[in-house]
Image (tube, rainbow, N blue to C red):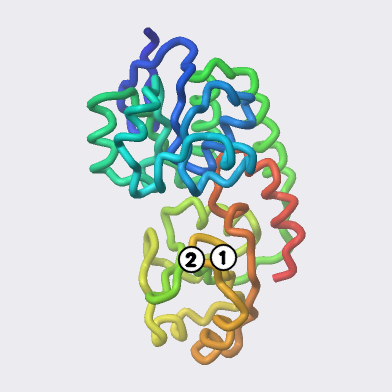
């Protein structure tokens, strides 16, 4: 059987044409659908909302963090597609003892394009992967944002958490024409004083993983009175599969 390297540098032995795939990452589930792997994908997480028909018809194996191992075993996958950040390390260590587990590691656009090419090759959809990556790369090359505002991208409340450096969201912010107000790496927690000190021009309230509402704007405005608040589609900033085909147009449409 072919041996593929994943984005962690691990060697994974996978059948030439996997026929029982479990995806533990929503954005990669959507990519598998884009590749036309309807019959091959047998299991997804409950957060894999695209495509909607798969959410209704495919076996759910739990969440991205809490996967039901026994359900996975019943599906007998010959390939599990996972991600370093979205899935727990302990979970991966358990699964890889029994099944081929391919791990992505995506913190910027180039790594996303590499992931798309690698998954396409591994699943027998190399041409589709090349086409998808090429179209995404061209669209981002054509993206010429006019704005260059200092932005705070919030992903959670209680505690407030933001997307910092060394994240895929940070790379998307830059490409969308923003400068990240947060200089810390990963996803720092921020108190009211720290929010005030950042002095962002724009606060972007993501639709996921926390569903921000209008009431949260009033709460945040007390410590950032001069900022403009915008609700944004979190999938466009954080999904790194075929959803990227729609991201540049969305970024250009933002009135922030």
Q: Quadrant of residue 81?
A: top left
Please state the horizontal and vertical placement of residue 184, each as a whole percent of the image: 38, 65
Residue depicted at 28% across the width and 32% down the height: 95
Q: Residues within 10 Å of mark 2 (few under 14, many from 20)?
A: many
Residue depicted at 27% across the width and 28% down the height: 96
**Of residues 244 and 93, the one drawn nearer to the viewer in this rendering:** 93
Left or right, 228 with reference to 83: right
Say which element carries label 1: strand
Residue 19 versus residue 84 in the image, above or below: above
Please state the horizontal and vertical placement of residue 43, each as a whole percent of the image: 46, 33
Residue 6 versus residue 233 in the image, above or below: above
Please state the horizontal and vertical placement of residue 34, each as a whole percent of the image: 64, 31
Q: Residues within 10 Å of mark 1 (few under 14, many from 20)?
A: many
- Residue extending farthest to the top is 1
Residue of label 1: 206
Residue depicted at 65% across the width and 66% down the height: 148
1 and 2 marks in contact (CB < 8 Å): yes
Mark 1 or 2, nearer chain start: 2
Say which element carries label 2: strand
Please state the horizontal and vertical placement of residue 232, each as a whole percent of the image: 64, 64
Q: Quadrant of residue 57?
A: top right
Residue of label 2: 155
Quadrant of the drawing holding the C terminus:
bottom right
Residue 148 versus residue 30 in the image, above or below: below
Mark 1–mark 2 Cα distance, whole angstroms, equals 6 Å
């Amino acid at each position: 059987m072919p041996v593929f390297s994943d984005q962690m540098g691990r060697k994974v032995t996978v059948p030439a044409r996997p026929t029982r795939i479990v995806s533990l990452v929503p954005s990669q589930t959507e990519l598998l659908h884009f590749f036309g792997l309807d019959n091959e994908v047998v299991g997804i997480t409950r957060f894999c909302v695209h495509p909607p028909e798969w959410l209704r018809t495919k076996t759910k194996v739990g969440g991205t963090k809490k996967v039901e191992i026994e359900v996975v075993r019943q599906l007998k996958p010959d390939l599990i597609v996972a991600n370093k950040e979205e899935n727990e390390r302990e979970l991966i260590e358990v699964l890889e003892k029994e099944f081929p587990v391919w791990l992505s590691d995506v913190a910027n656009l180039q790594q996303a394009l590499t992931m798309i090419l690698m998954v396409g090759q591994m699943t027998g959809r190399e041409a589709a992967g090349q086409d998808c990556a090429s179209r995404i790369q061209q669209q981002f090359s054509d993206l010429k944002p006019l704005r260059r505002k200092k932005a705070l991208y919030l992903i959670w409340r209680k505690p407030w958490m933001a997307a910092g450096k060394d994240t895929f969201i940070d790379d998307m912010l830059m490409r969308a024409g923003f400068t990240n107000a947060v200089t810390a790496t990963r996803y720092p927690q921020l108190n009211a004083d720290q929010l005030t000190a950042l002095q962002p021009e724009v606060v972007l309230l993501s639709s996921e993983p926390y569903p921000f509402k209008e009431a949260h704007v009033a709460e945040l405005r007390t410590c950032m009175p001069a900022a403009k608040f915008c609700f944004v589609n979190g999938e466009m900033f954080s999904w790194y599969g075929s959803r990227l085909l729609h991201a540049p147009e969305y970024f250009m449409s933002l009135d922030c």
